[in-house]
Amino acid sequence: MNGYKKIIYQVDQSIARITLNRPDKRNALDEEIINEMKDALAHAARDAAVRVVAVAGAGKDFCSGADLAALRRASEATVIENVDNARNMGEMFIAMRRHPRPIVATVRGRALAGGCGIATACDLILASESAQFGYPEVKIGFIPAMVMAILRRSVSEKRAFELITRGEIITARAALDLGLINRVFSDDEFESGVEAYLSDLAAKSASAVSLSKNLLYHMDAMTFEAAIEAGVQLNAIARMTEDCKRGVERFLKK
């Protein structure tokens, strides 16, 4: 699509690719880039040809967090202005959670602060061996407030507490051990590994993947009994999809 200034959006073989495109500023975040990401996510959600959304950063880093100008404006803004600005990013996290397609962060270099937040908000995270992750906000007296809702669902409570209060920057392997990310590829094999992973995911039943994502996150605040009942409803719906009917037919013919 045309019209974006700070991201690149393109669809290639059923994969929608959103690339943060401020390599000279390590893809730092401001309100404009957040708005463009929200728009691209909405476009991908409406496109029936899209089966997977991949988020990447141009250049050496995934995203370094908020840019200096945005931090300066925040320090000078009113409470209402800061609430509106924070809500804008919060709305993006919600849109990612509700998106009908799996969203995959493909991380090279640094994913820090808000950049780590965007990666964590994705459904899956693939990283190169040399990638780094962290929430260093505490070092400037700030907190990764909104992303805590996602982080505490991704790692244990004690690990989440340590990440946000120490502000330590960790390696991809350490992030993998914590359960923060899904896969680590060697730097030399990162691109080929990512493409194979994305292609494999895109080849899966779109309806099954979408229903699975919806149900998994819908269970967040449910009791066990309510989660089972939600599973009953989605189980019945899944049986009626064309993908499932064709899959069962193929299985029975084996």
Image (cartoon, rainbow, N blue to C red):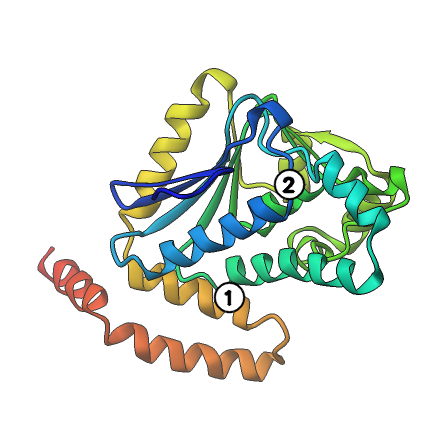
Percent across and percent down for residue 25 are 63, 27
Instruction: From the viewer's side, name the closer residue of 109 and 187.
Output: 109
- Give the Cα distance between marks 2 and 1: 29 Å
User: Mark 2 belongs to which amino acid?
Assistant: Leu
Q: State the image quarter where residue 171 is shown.
A: top right
Q: Would residue 23 appear left or right of 18 to someone viewing this image?
A: right
Q: Would residue 51 appear left or right of 163 to someone viewing this image?
A: left
Q: Would residue 24 appear left or right of 168 to someone viewing this image?
A: left
User: Badge 2: few (under 14), some or many (20 or more) residues near its Cα, within 10 Å?
Assistant: many
> Which residue appears at 65% of the width and 46% of the height?
117
Indicate which disc residue 29 carries. Answer: 2
Viewer-side label of 2, 1: 2
User: Can you say whether 159 is above or below 139 in the image?
Assistant: below
Instruction: From the viewer's side, name the closer residue of 143 and 218.
Output: 143
Q: State the image quarter where residue 198 is shown.
A: top left
Residue at far top of view: 188
Image quarter (top left, top right, bottom left or bottom right) of the C terminus: bottom left
